[in-house]
Amino acid sequence: MSVKTQAELETQLVQRLVQVEEGLLPEREAFGAIENWILHLYERKAFLHPNLKQWMWYDRFHDEWVFAGCGVRQGILMVINKTGGIKKLPYEDDVSNWCVLVQDDQPYGPLHIEELRDKFQRGEMKPEGLIWTPCGNEWIPVTDARIRNLIFGKDLKGG
């Protein structure tokens, strides 16, 4: 089983919806089992509901899925400590264009990748900073090579 990211699941949903609308794929086959739409973020789980196009968090205490407060292309799902949350985007967009930066225990964002690139080029990125991107499932240190790949347009998984 490969690890899925928020960006991958949202892209997959959009592609499958088009296939269903064009009659190329039956709805049952397009969306399959719930497990296909679950995102693992540290100890938390999120579920992209294919029919509602909404994200949900798993509430272990009540053993149920609850709405996260954002749909596809609307926000970044993230985990701080053990708490799941979202950072709403200023407008609907591909989530892979956005990230959240933490420096000095202060979150900044959501930041567009171009804003992050500008901060990087101006030398405003502190080495102890962390970045959360929907293209990954963890906080990544600013000094990690994957961040340079993200900023300068290469595959985040390489590095």
Image: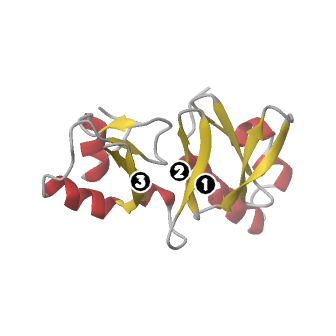
Which residue matches tag 3? 99
Residue most extreme to the left: 122
Classify mark 3: residues with Cα within 10 Å, few (<14), some (14-19) or many (20+): many
The disc labelled 2 sits on which kind of residue?
A: Ala
Name the residue rendered at 21%, 43% in the picture.
Answer: 126
* Residue under the point 46% across and 46% down: 135
* Residue depth check, mark 1 versus mark 3: number of the one nearer the observer: 3
Considering only order in the chain, which callout, 3 or 1, is on the residue closer to the N terminus?
1
**What is the x, y in percent for residue 115?**
29, 63
Q: In the image, which disc is placed on residue 7? A: 2
Q: Gap between marks 1 and 3, in whole Å?
A: 15 Å
Asked whether disc 3 touches disc 2, contact meaning CB atoms under 8 Å apart, the reply is: no
Label 3 or label 2, whichever comes before in sequence order: 2
Q: Residue at x 21, y 48 (%)?
A: 125
Residue type at mark 1: give it: Glu
Give above or below for 138 relative to 26. Answer: above
Residue type (three-letter) at the residue carrying disc 3: Cys
**Quadrant holding the C terminus:** top left
